[in-house]
Amino acid sequence: MQRRFHYELAFEHYLRENGIPHISVDEAKRSLIGNKGAGKVNIKSFDFVVYAEGGANLLIDVKGRKHAANTGRALQNWVTEDDVKGLTKWQHIFGDNFVPVFVFLYWCDVQPPDALFMEIFEFKDRWYAMTAVKLEEYMSYMRPRSAAWGTVSIPTSSFDRIQRPLQDLLTGLSETKSI
């Protein structure tokens, strides 16, 4: 499948390079769920189904963000309300053996310091840093960001506490970090 955005391309490269089994989802299409007629519901697609070795399988929605290393700004962690609703619906459809996850993929101007991110990689002359948050944990802390745009985010301190390396989710090491 041809992907339009470099974030999804970079993430798929990461999965392939690390030998992580996955299926790409065509984000250009929305799925219709329900009976014929008025009962049909549009559900926003996620990006990847990722099969884990030791943990639950993952339904991943990649959220690409630009991060300038020298700004000192907090990592952007906003998503749309539609993202949250869509992943929630997909979790119910796929069942308990699948965990919905937001993967925040930050495109960095230069190679980011290891202390800031636990998972960094290069793809097509761009540096990316990655962190993951389970939907359930994200929803516990999310607050409205922009009613006009339908976006939500979580406070930086909460994000720092619940984010984790994707590898931890894939291997079953997914306990929330304590501060």
Image (tube, rainbow, N blue to C red):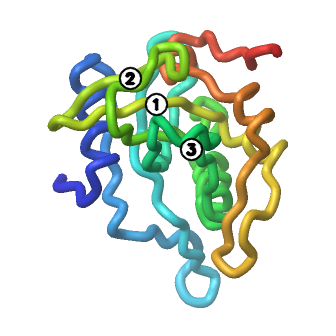
Q: Which residue is mark 2?
A: 120
Q: Give coordinates of residue 72: x percent, y percent.
A: 59, 38
Amino acid carrying label 3: it is Phe
For the residues bearing labels 1 and 2, Cβ distance under 8 angstroms: yes
Mark nearer the N terminus (3 vs 2): 3
Q: Residues within 10 Å of mark 1 (few under 14, many from 20)?
A: many
Amino acid carrying label 1: it is Met
Q: Which residue is mark 3?
A: 94
Q: Nearer the viewer, mark 3 or mark 2?
A: 2
Res. 100 image quadrant: top right
Left or right of 61? Residue 39 is right
Alpha carbon separation for disc pair 3 and 2 = 30 Å
Residue at x-position 75% and y-position 25%: 161
Residue 101 visible, this angle: no
Q: Residues within 10 Å of mark 2 (few under 14, many from 20)?
A: many
Q: Give coordinates of residue 176: x percent, y percent.
A: 75, 19
- Circle 1 sits in a helix, a strand or a loop, which is it? strand
Residue at x-position 63% and y-position 34%: 133
Q: Which residue is mark 1?
A: 130
